């Protein structure tokens, strides 16, 4: 089964949107495989967005991500990366259509409430960053249906 990494950013957690956002993914058909609330440090935020480090907004992005707790999760489902990106909507909430998370819950590109991996390779890299040696504590196995 495909999987992706999704993170509710600090403004999403602060505004009490965690349940509403998770609900969008569950309604879509994703299975929640792992979830944790955490406060990330600058080093983890910088590694997470390493490919953006030359961008003029990088410092602000790291300030924002470390400004409060985030909710990190692993979601499983068919075409997990692409389906999660479509539930999330365009990067800039001004362009994100209503019905997407950013279209419904965000106003500004600098605080767009949720992150989703952009490729299966990024998903595995990000899952490795956020769910490290303690992953077993957070990863819930798919329930096995007993044979009748
Ligand atoms: P994310 O990684 O957070 O899911 O967002 P994304 O793939 O849609 O967009 P990406 O290019 O990876 O950018 C990461 C985050 O950087 C902030 N950003 N600010 N000021 C700007 O022009 C600008 N452009 C991007 C956004 O918060 C974006 O989510
Ligand atoms: Mg991205």
Image (spheres, rainbow, N blue to C red):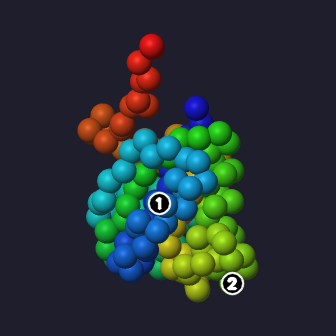
Which residue shows up at 58% across the image and 85% down it?
A: 108
Residue at the spot of label 1: 22
**How many numbered callouts?**
2
Ligand 2 resides in the quarter of the picture at bottom right
Expressed as whole percent of the image width and height from the top left, the position of residue 35 reads 36, 50
**Of helix, strand and loop, which one carries label 2?**
loop
Q: Would residue 30 be found to the left or right of residue 66 on screen?
A: right
Q: Is residue 71 above or below residue 101?
A: above
Question: Quarter of the image holding residue 66?
Answer: bottom left
Identify which residue is drawn at 32% across, 73% down.
Answer: 68
Q: Is mark 1 within 8 Å of ligand 1?
A: no
Q: Secondary structure at mark 1?
A: helix
User: How far across and how far down the image is residue 4, in percent?
Assistant: 55, 46
Q: Is residue 117 visible?
A: yes
In the rendered image, residue 147, in percent from the top left (x then y), is placed at 45, 14
Q: Quadrant of the C terminus?
A: top left
- Pinpoint residue 50: horizontal percent, then vertical percent: 52, 58
Q: Position of 63 compared to 58: left or right?
A: left
Q: Mark on residue 94?
A: 2
The residue lying toward the viewer, choosing from 2 and 24, is 24
């Amino acid at each position: 089964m495909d999987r992706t990494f999704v993170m509710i950013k600090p403004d999403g957690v602060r505004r009490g949107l965690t349940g509403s956002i998770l609900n969008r993914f569950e309604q879509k058909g994703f299975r929640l495989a792992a979830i944790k609330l955490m406060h990330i440090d600058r080093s983890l935020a910088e590694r997470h967005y390493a490919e953006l480090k030359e961008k003029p907004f990088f410092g602000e992005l790291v300030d924002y991500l470390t400004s409060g707790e985030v909710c990190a999760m692993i979601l499983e489902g068919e075409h997990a990366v692409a389906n999660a990106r479509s539930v999330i909507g365009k990067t800039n909430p001004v362009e994100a259509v209503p019905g997407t998370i950013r279209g419904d819950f965000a106003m500004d590109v600098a605080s767009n409430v949720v992150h989703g991996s952009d490729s299966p390779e990024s998903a595995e890299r990000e899952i490795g960053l956020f769910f490290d040696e303690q992953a077993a504590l957070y990863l819930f196995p798919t329930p096995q249906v007993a044979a009748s």
